[in-house]
Image (spheres, rainbow, N blue to C red):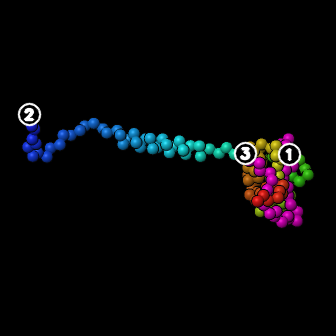
Amino acid sequence: MGLHLNEGGDDLAENHEINVTPFIDVMLVLLIIFMVAAPLATVDIKVDLPASTAKPAPRPEKPIFLSVKADQNLYLGEDQVSREQLGALLDAKTKGDKDTTIFFQADKGVDYGDLMDVMNTLRAAGYLKVGLVGLETAAKK
């Protein structure tokens, strides 16, 4: 019969190995968090923007309409204009007043990139007050 008695020493044997169990637990928790959060980060919603239920703003005495048709032609009022002429023609029509609201309307078929190009042209010309025009629809409850 063998008996091993500890002689009262406080010495614990040092363990030089890394305990990876906590690291694995943390990695699994992070994996689960990312698996749940990743589908929420993507937006997959079809948007149909032209109609609005917003209360129409009062129409100014002489509104300035800028239109983009489906064939990408740009119209200031009834006159067809090029993007290069837009700033000069707006200055002439508004008498240089950059605070004039420009009412911007675009066909449903106009590409969003083309729409943003026209908006950037307006911003470069100094016209920052732009009203987007849409169709009125009845409010859904």
Identify the residue at image location x=73%, y=53%: 123
Marks 3 and 2, the one that precedes in the sequence: 2
Marks 1 and 2, the one that precedes in the sequence: 2
Instruction: Please give the residue where the numbered disc 3 appears in the rendered image.
Output: 46
**Main structural element of the magenta stretch: helix, strand or loop?**
loop
Q: Position of residue 16 (x, y in %)?
A: 25, 37
Image quadrant occupied by the C terminus: bottom right
Q: Which amino acid lies under the numbered mark 3 shown in the image of this protein?
A: Lys
Q: Nearer the viewer, residue 113 or 55?
A: 55
Instruction: Please give the residue where the numbered disc 1 appears in the rendered image.
Output: 69
Task: Bin the neighbour count of mark 1 within 10 Å (Cα to Cα): few under 14, some 14-19, many 20 and up.
Answer: some
Q: Position of residue 94 (x, y in %)?
A: 84, 60
Q: Which amino acid lies under the numbered mark 2 shown in the image of this protein?
A: Met
Q: Which amino acid lies under the numbered mark 1 shown in the image of this protein?
A: Lys
Task: Tell me the SS state at disc 1.
Answer: loop
Residue 7 relative to residue 85: left or right: left
Residue 134 relative to residue 8: left or right: right
Q: CA distance from mark 3 to mark 2?
A: 81 Å
- Farthest-out residue, top: 1
Instruction: Please give the residue where the numbered disc 2 appears in the rendered image.
Output: 1
Q: Nearer the viewer, residue 141 or 105?
A: 141
Residue 139 relative to residue 34: left or right: right
Q: Nearer the viewer, mark 3 or mark 1?
A: 3
- Farthest-out residue, front: 1
State the extent of the magenta-drawn residues as a range: 46-75
Identify the residue at image location x=44%, y=41%: 28
Residue 42 sits above or below residue 104 on the image: above
